[in-house]
Image (spheres, rainbow, N blue to C red):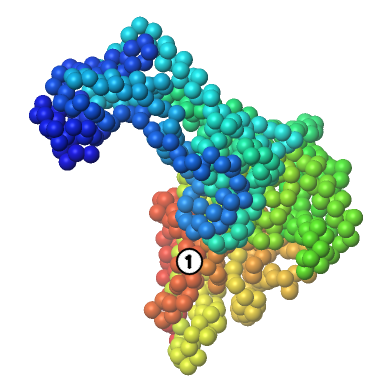
């Protein structure tokens, strides 16, 4: 480019500038000033611009459609394995995370690809002729976008007779010369493209691969789970479990092309993924009405080809959404849950709303395995994953994992679960990202999928949930549901607990090794728990701690003061019958206080109104699930978090910060919903507790 691109345009001839380039910016600036000039498109699509004082005998001016060719190596066939090996080196976990949680990622990346393709596509060439006072440019394929650039630059574009019709026809022909076909064959999604498009497909396929890539572990450097296979030089196939995810990508591309103001640059023949159907006629559905947000979630799931994740707060009625999905799809359904309490809950509610006798609902868990002839089967993640692990052990003879069951039984069982269902519902779907459970979502060839959870957190590892069960298509906050009265407003209070003189001395002598022990054994924590239970604002209470010894100490302390409590741990509750009996007593208010260690974090439907966190981990998901035990409508949910005063010991404060869920429960919103009288009563209780720490 010349140092002063507009110099020659003022009519000052300079032999030294003969053959100089005029930049895009200089030409646009000139055209804006000289609006009287016209661009005339002839019938043969000649592009004529006249400059009365045109100074050059040669000109290499910027032209909208001058696009150089790609490099020669781009003509070689696609190699899926090479691309995935390249992705292994990618360490941009932020971008990896974005593509799973924000659907605009696909549209944004495709738009970038589209711009680059327009810029570098050598198909758009032009013939130039030069004269002393004018130059003529001929475009074999002139695009509408080029005309828009000229108009914005201040040119008046004039079409001579027949030029506009020819331009439109050429655009249509040009796009069809490059074609991609996306279709369902043998219950797999296949993508193929023609030879003309091959050298342009490399970069688009790279975007597609990045969208489909799923890491096997919570590690940016981990290997990817294979989901795309190559079946020809210009044809690839997406595995069954990932077909809906691929379908989502090409659907966005298809919509982007159709919504564009300009003609598409290539022809995309898109056929939405359609797995074979196995209809099952359920009994007459009992009348029920979905809430507005539940209906919106269902509508979005249907629009997304029955593939997606729904994130709603605990107590918002996710189970009813799943039941409505079963009713609508009319397919044999597999429901996955993390514990036996949820097995019973799904059986009871499904039987109630779909008028299917509970005896006709199959169960697959450690206690019962009746599933073959049932239209609906409820299974635990644990047992199904164990069978899958056994199957993989048989298939990989060199695997160190020893199968626990006979091969015939395992293959027959997994064969049934793989091919007999048309709908998969994953309740508390965040469990899928666990290493022991993720094979369920990858191996089961169940096409229609619905994930339900209150805690699908944004992390590299949870992308497995999104990839195998579908993107988050609907989510709603605690604050919004509380404002509309669907769940209880939450009162969150963090109480700082001072250490006694003896505890401070013990800590100073022992150092960091006893931080956790001191925080759990603090005397004033026990006092705070007792005072909260004695307060009139609390009734049905759940006390959570992270250690069994701490739970037993709390129980013993409260018993000394005549306060009856029940401890729920793996040591105190020997079987599910015992557990269900205790839960039933709690629902009937025959038991008012439960002390818990890792039990009932999720799937526990009970009339609790108070949660006390005596000690805990850094796990945010665990914290969200715990508060959900008390958010049923009709009361105020009270959450008290007891931590050692950070001025005396900052260990527990740092742990509490890591699990902080203020952004989820929105205390500023919840506070507006609380009756003034209740707030005053709670504040008085907290003040009394603080005073009691220093009573002699």
Give residue 596's quadrant in the image: bottom right
Q: Nearer the viewer, residue 395 or 243?
A: 395
Residue 281: percent from left, percent from top: 80, 31
Residue with the most extreme bottom position: 509
Residue assigned mark 1? 658
Secondary structure state at the residue bearing disc 1: helix
Q: Name the spot of residue 528 as percent of width and height, x first.
A: 51, 74
Left or right of residue 679: residue 532: right
Residue 390 percent coordinates (x, y): 80, 60
Instruction: Locate residue 56: give its quadrant.
Output: top left
How many marks the image carries: the answer is 1
Whether residue 541 appears in this view of the structure is yes
> Residue lying farthest top?
161
Q: Is residue 515 above or below residue 200?
A: below
Question: Image point 72% across, 53% down: which residue?
Answer: 440
**At x 55% / y 36%, what residue is drawn?**
198
Looking at the image, residue 259 sits to the left or right of residue 182; the answer is left
Along the line of sight, which residue is nearer the eye, 340 or 563? 340
In this view of the protein, which residue sits in the foreground, 408 or 619? 408
* Front-lying residue, 578 or 10: 10
Residue 141 falls left or right of residue 350: left
Quadrant of residue 142 within the rendered picture = top left
Q: Is residue 635 visible?
A: no
Q: Residue at x 14, y 32 (%)?
A: 15
Residue at the far front in the pictured view: 15
């Amino acid at each position: 480019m010349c140092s002063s691109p507009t110099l020659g345009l003022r009519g000052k001839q300079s032999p030294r500038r003969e053959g100089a380039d005029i930049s895009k910016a200089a030409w646009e600036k000139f055209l804006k000033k000289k609006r009287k000039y016209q661009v005339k498109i002839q019938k043969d699509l000649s592009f004529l611009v006249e400059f009365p004082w045109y100074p050059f005998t040669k000109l290499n001016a910027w032209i909208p459609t001058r696009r150089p060719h790609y490099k020669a190596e781009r003509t070689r066939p696609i190699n899926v394995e090479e691309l995935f090996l390249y992705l292994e080196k990618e360490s941009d976990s932020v971008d990896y995370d974005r593509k799973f949680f924000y659907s605009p990622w696909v549209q944004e990346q495709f738009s970038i690809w589209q711009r680059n393709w327009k810029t570098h596509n050598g198909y758009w060439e032009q013939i130039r002729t030069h004269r002393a006072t004018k130059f003529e440019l001929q475009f074999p394929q002139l695009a509408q976008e080029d005309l828009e650039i000229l108009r914005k630059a201040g040119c008046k574009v004039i079409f001579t007779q027949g030029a506009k019709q020819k331009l439109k026809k050429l655009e249509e022909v040009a796009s069809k010369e490059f074609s991609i076909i996306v279709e369902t064959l043998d219950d797999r999604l296949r993508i193929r493209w023609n030879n003309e498009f091959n050298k342009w497909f490399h970069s688009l396929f790279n975007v597609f691969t990045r969208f489909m890539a799923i890491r096997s572990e919570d590690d940016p450097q981990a290997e990817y789970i294979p989901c795309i296979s190559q079946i020809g030089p210009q044809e690839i196939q997406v595995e069954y479990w990932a077909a809906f995810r691929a379908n989502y990508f090409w659907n966005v591309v298809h919509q982007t092309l159709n919504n564009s103001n300009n003609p598409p640059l290539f022809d995309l023949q898109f056929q939405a993924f359609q797995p074979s159907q196995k209809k099952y006629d359920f009994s007459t559905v009992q009348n029920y009405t979905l809430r507005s947000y539940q209906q919106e979630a269902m509508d979005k799931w249907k629009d997304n080809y029955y593939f997606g994740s729904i994130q709603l707060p605990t107590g918002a009625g996710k189970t009813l959404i799943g039941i409505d999905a079963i009713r609508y799809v009319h397919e044999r359904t597999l429901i996955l849950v993390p514990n036996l309490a949820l097995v019973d809950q799904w059986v009871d509610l499904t039987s109630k709303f779909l008028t299917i006798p509970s005896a006709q609902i199959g169960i697959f868990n450690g206690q019962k395995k009746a599933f073959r002839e049932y239209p609906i089967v409820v299974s635990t993640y644990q047992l199904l994953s164990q069978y899958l692990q056994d199957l993989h052990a048989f298939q990989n003879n060199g695997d160190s994992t020893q199968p626990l069951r006979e091969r015939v039984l395992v293959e027959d069982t997994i064969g049934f679960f793989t091919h007999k269902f048309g709908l998969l519902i994953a309740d508390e779907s965040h469990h899928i990202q666990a290493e022991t459970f993720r094979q369920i979502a990858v191996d089961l060839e169940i096409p229609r999928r619905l994930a339900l959870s209150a805690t699908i957190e944004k992390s590299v590892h949870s992308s497995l949930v999104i990839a195998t069960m579908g993107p988050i298509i609907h989510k709603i906050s605690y604050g919004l549901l509380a404002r509309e009265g669907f769940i209880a407003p939450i009162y969150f209070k963090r109480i700082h607990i001072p250490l006694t003189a003896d505890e401070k001395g013990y800590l100073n002598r022992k150092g960091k090794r006893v931080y956790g022990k001191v925080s759990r054994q603090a005397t004033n924590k026990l006092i705070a728990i007792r005072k909260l239970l004695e307060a009139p604002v609390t009734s049905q209470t759940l006390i959570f701690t992270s250690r069994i010894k701490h739970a037993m100490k709390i129980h013993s302390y409260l018993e000394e003061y005549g306060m009856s409590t029940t401890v729920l741990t793996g040591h105190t509750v020997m079987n599910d019958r015992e557990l269900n009996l205790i839960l039933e007593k709690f629902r009937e208010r025959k038991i008012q206080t439960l002390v818990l260690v890792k039990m009932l974090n999720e799937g526990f439907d009970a009339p609790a109104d108070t949660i006390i966190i005596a000690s805990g981990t850094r796990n945010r998901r665990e914290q969200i699930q715990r508060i959900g035990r008390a958010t049923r409508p009709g009361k105020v949910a009270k959450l008290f978090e007891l931590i050692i005063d950070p001025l005396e010991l900052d260990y527990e404060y740092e742990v509490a910060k890591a699990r902080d869920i203020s952004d989820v429960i929105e205390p500023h919103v919840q506070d507006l919903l609380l009756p003034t009288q209740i707030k005053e009563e709670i504040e008085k209780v907290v003040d009394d507790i603080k005073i009691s720490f220093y009573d002699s």
